[in-house]
Amino acid sequence: MSQLNASQNPATTRRDPEEEAVHRALEGYYRTGKPPWDTGVTPPELVDLIEGHGALPPGRALELGCGTGTNAIYLARHGWEVAAVDLIDSAVDQAREKAAAAGVAVRVRHGDATRLDDLDVPGPFDLFFDLSCYCGIPLHRRDAYAAGLTHRAAPGALLLMFGYGPETLDNPVSEITSWAAGVTADELRDRFPGWALIDVTPGTNSVPTFWFTLRRDA
């Protein structure tokens, strides 16, 4: 669940009140050491895409909301050229340290997944991975997220996204309406013109969650 911005200097970012509330909430998760999306284990859905039957050949990947880098490092270990973005500086620091310790090259950028033009992630990318980043983005910034990915997508690129369904969080922050809105297949079809939603698989969580796979038109 992550995003940010301007001139690669978080202190100068102009965010509206809901964006600021998201930033504070995410910082709080990392401060307590309990971000639920950052388990340290690469999800089997990504492993299957990279190593399973019909696995993708290594190419260029961008992870949105990379947290402390678990999945970006996994991709790099499997031959991918990886860039990764996260809104929270402490998560970015940890991701860079973990990548260095693992001996893999991952370009980790401190920034906003809805403002990719402010970051050094030009693309094109063959794969985008999002583990509950999009569903935490304020609704009014989601078109910008989609446009940023579309602009950087190679023909036929895939987006693998995990997201919470509507109203699944126990205590959504009142200022953050997007967290109660979650994400749905219909929304993704509307916000990602030029992409096909090719798979929706329910997650195994105790609340409604989904794995969405989208493919960019060739």
Image: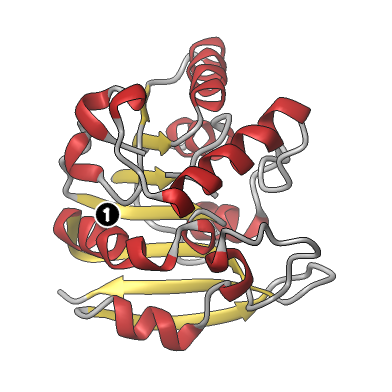
Which color scheme is applied? secondary structure
The one nearer the camera, 25 or 174, is: 174
Residue 130, given in percent of the width and then of the height, sits at: 48, 54
Q: Where is residue 120 in the image (x, y as percent from the top left)?
A: 20, 31
Q: Nearer the viewer, residue 79 or 155?
A: 155
Q: Relative to residue 100, is residue 55 depicted above or below?
A: below
Q: Is 120 situated left or right of 95 in this image?
A: left
**Which residue lies at the image location 56% right of the left edge and 21% below the top edge?**
90
Residue 101 vertical placement versus 89 (above, below): above
Is 92 situated left or right of 211 in this image? left
Give the x, y percent position of residue 145: 31, 59
**Secondary structure beneath disc 1?**
strand
* Residue position marked by numbered label 1 in the rendering: 126
**Disc 1 packing (10 Å; few <14; some 14–19; many ≥20):** many
Q: On screen, 38 above or below 31?
A: below
The residue lying at 74 percent from left, 65 percent from top is: 169
Residue type at mark 1? Asp
Q: How many marks?
A: 1
Q: Residue at x 31, y 77 (%)?
A: 191
List x then y, in percent, for residue 37.
67, 47
User: Can the viewer see residue 79 in this picture?
Assistant: no
Quadrant where the image shows the C terminus: bottom left
